[in-house]
Amino acid sequence: MITISFLTAPVPSPNSRLELEKFELESEKISEPLQILHLSDLHFTRWGRLEDKLLAEVAGLEFDLMVMTGDYIDNMRNFDKFRTFLQQLSRQVPAFAVPGNHDYRYDLDKIGRGLSGAGIRLLRNEHVELKVSGSSINIVGVGCPRMDRHRFAHACTPKKSGSGFNLVLSHTYQVIEQIEEMGRTHSLPRQELILAGDTHGRQVDLPVVRFFFDLIYQEDFVSGLFELEGENLGHLYVNRGLGVSAVPLRINCPPEITLIELKPVDRD
């Protein structure tokens, strides 16, 4: 059983338009409350005000696990600054990342080394089991479904699926299709929470842009939290991301960081 509630509406950072989104999930697989920080789509080009604001915001948060869902850097000439930025961002908590489509276009191995140097493990179709605040968490990290030949099934097999809380990290929400496909042929446990990015929440959220964006891209899940249908699917959260691509601005779609609280089921 898993239940959900939002704690607050988006909370603007006092320093910027950067917004902190918070929500909570209850699960029978969680023994003590734990906090997950979710970041996505940094698209680092230079160290500017957004990066400073992000560091300040994260420094004021308490969390037990950090996850990142792709598209980290768009200017490899500033890789040294990017690496230093990651080192300042990271904390003494388990941290995992998956690649995005932009990362494949650059030097994914080098980006992976930059993440690793900051204590962030890059998962490419890999499965990790760990204890966080007394709860067993199974993390499946999938290579970008649009760019990587490998699939969810390479990272998560029935033998690797334990009794813990199943958390899937993917740059795009299309990993849902791979989960459904595997569920039709294998005994697959429920994937309680899927975290993704990529869409930027449309980035420019105006009626005319929304119309053409939805017409061209036909995205089913643009941003926010969704309860999915299907025996093997729980909830999906699509992060609006931090950076920009194609058009260097955001309108009605501020960058976000997300804090998720996993809680035991309240029996009262």
Image: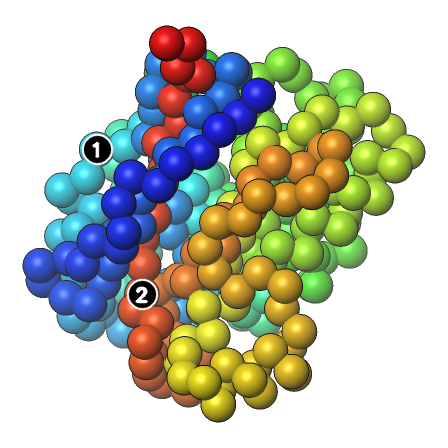
Neighbour class for label 1 at 10 Å: few (<14), some, many (≥20)? few
Q: Is there any visible trace of residue 99 in the rendered image?
A: no
Residue 113 in percent (x, y) is at 45, 49
- The reply to whether dot 2 and dot 1 touch (C-beta < 8 Å) is no
Residue marked by disc 2 = 255
Does the rendering let one see residue 244? yes
**Which mark sits nearer the N-terminus, 2 or 1?**
1
Q: Quadrant of residue 15?
A: bottom left
Q: Measured from the top left, where is residue 265 in percent x and y?
A: 44, 16
Residue placed under numbered mark 1 in the picture: 62
Name the image quarter holding the N terminus. top right
Q: Is residue 69 above or below residue 92?
A: below
Residue type beneath disc 2 = Pro
Q: Nearer the viewer, residue 197 or 121?
A: 197
**Position of residue 125 measured from the top left corner of the image (x, y, whole percent):** 67, 42
Disc 1 on helix, strand or loop?
A: loop
- Which residue is most to the left? 14
Of 5 and 165, which appears nearest the observer? 5
Q: Residue at x 65, y 16 (%)?
A: 162
Residue 123 rendering spot, x and y as whole percentages: 57, 42
84 relative position to 136: left or right: left
